Amino acid sequence: MKLRTPMPELEGATEWLNGEVSKEDLVGGKPTLIHFWSVSCGLCKEAMPNVNEFRDEYKDDLNVVAVHMPRSEKDLDLDQIKEVAEEHGISQPIFVDNKHALTDAFENQYVPAYYVFDAEGNLRHFQAGGGGMKMLRKRVNRVLGLNEKK
């Protein structure tokens, strides 16, 4: 996905966990962080406390949605996805993408991957990989119109 591209529709989920949201629910109010993860991804699990911290710290100013992107047949097990989500405190809505519908719509190839959309639903920042939480925080703050020192 290129910067400033509109958020794709959140369609084609195998299942939603922790509630379902649509693009209409997310756009027009506040910015959104969509993060891709997988049960078989060690870096995702390591980064999850940071994502959860974001979710909690910015709960009034930022929508947070998780997308579970399977990397192999083993990752398709819904019970395992639920278990890992619970283990790692993922309480935000989770789009289970066993058919890669949203993964393809985002043209995403990575886990973890982070997409920050502004309130109008346009992509303002993308990053992939386990590190870079400072950069992600900076970009989220910029989209929220906060100073860099939060």
Image (cartoon, rainbow, N blue to C red):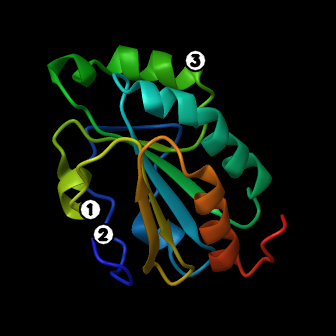
Report x, y in % for residue 51.
61, 44
1 or 2: tag closer to the N-terminus: 2
Q: Quadrant of residue 123?
A: bottom left
Give the crowd class for mark 1: few <14, some 14-19, many >=20 residues within 10 Å. some
Spot the residue most to the right.
Answer: 149
Question: Which circle marks residue 87 in the picture?
Answer: 3
Q: In this view, does 20 lie to the left or right of 102?
A: right
Amino acid type of the residue tagged 2 in the rendering: Pro
The picture places residue 95, in percent across and down from the top left corner, at 38, 44
Name the amino acid type tagged 3: Glu
* Of marks 1 and 2, the one in the foreground: 1
The amino acid beneath tag 1 is: Phe
The label shown at residue 106 is 1
User: Between 117 and 83, which is closer to the camera in this rendering?
Assistant: 117
Pick the front one: 121 or 136: 136
Q: Residues within 10 Å of mark 2 (few under 14, many from 20)?
A: some
Residue 132 shown left or right of residue 38 in the figure? right
- Asked if residue 143 is positioned above or below residue 53 in the image, the reply reads below
Asked if the residues shown at circle 2 and circle 3 are in contact, with their CB atoms under 8 angstroms apart, the answer is no
**Element at badge 2?**
loop
Looking at the figure, which quarter contains the N terminus? bottom left
| Image point (56%, 36%), residue name | 47
Residue that mark 2 sits on: 8
Against 40, residue 90 (above or below) is: below
- Please tell me which of labels 2 and 3 falls first in the chain: 2
Give the residue displayed 25% in from the left and 55% down from the top. 108
Which of marks 3 and 1 precedes in the sequence?
A: 3
Q: How far apart are marks 1 and 2 (CA)?
A: 7 Å
For the residue labelled by badge 3, is the local secondary structure a helix, a strand or a loop? helix
- Residue at image coords 30%, 69%: 8
